[in-house]
Amino acid sequence: MSNVILVNNQDEAIGERDKMDAHLGEGELHRAYTILVSNNRGEVLLQKRAKGKMLWPLFWEATCSSHQTQGGKSENEQIKLAEKRLGEEMGFTCNLKLISKFQYHNLYKNIGAEKELCWLLIGEWGGTVSPNPEEVVDYQWVMPISLIEEIKQKPSDFAPWLFRALEIFIEKQKNENKS
């Protein structure tokens, strides 16, 4: 199993922990990323997590989410690793950029928790999507505003970090449209 980067509330690395161990019990705060890829129609790409996932299996979530590793020391290196992971999960890659960071903590049943300081990365893609079936069982393109309403109506279908990521994404779009 791989290690995750443990961080404090200011996103400063304070150590490493086995990925599985960092998710047990209440979890330990570690660095992660969530990727939202949009198309030229303004839709975002969602994936439905594979059945074999320890936490939130068969839940809809962002285009791709994973953990940062010590493999990349700089912000740019971490973004390049996220682009690579996007390719491994969704079968395509695109340039990503960091737009925000957010922290969340959610327990999943009596199995474990996500306690993450999450980098929100965005990109654009208009080509073919070929998800890895070991990671993803389904995918769909959805308008962000419609998705927010759907999550509010049936939150039990969605990974808990998706709502916050979408709020930030939509706010960024609004601010860019004002400029």
Image: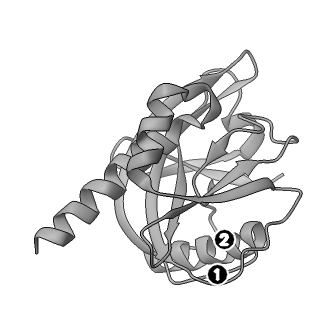
Looking at the rendered structure, the kind of residue marked 2 is Leu
Q: Which residue is identified by label 1?
A: 93
Residue 104, image x and y in percent? 45, 35
Going 49% across and 36% down the picture, which residue do you hit?
Answer: 150
Residue 97, image x and y in percent? 41, 75
- Please tell me whether residue 103 is drawn above or below residue 93 in the rendered image: above
Please name the colour scheme applied to the rendered image: one colour
**Figure quadrant of residue 111:** top right
Q: What is the spatial separation of the Cα atoms under label 2 and label 1, in whole angstroms?
A: 6 Å
- Which sits in the foreground, 161 or 39? 39
Residue 123, image x and y in percent? 48, 75
Estimate how packed mark 2 is, as few (under 14), some (14 to 19) or many (20 or more) residues with alpha carbons within 10 Å. Answer: many
- Which sits in the foreground, 26 or 98? 98
Going 67% across and 21% down the picture, which residue do you hit?
Answer: 25
Q: Which residue is identified by label 2?
A: 86
Looking at the rendered structure, the kind of residue marked 1 is Thr
Does residue 74 appear anywhere in the picture? no
Q: Is residue 138 left or right of residue 52?
A: left
Going 42% across and 41% down the picture, which residue do you hit?
Answer: 148
2 and 1 marks in contact (CB < 8 Å): yes
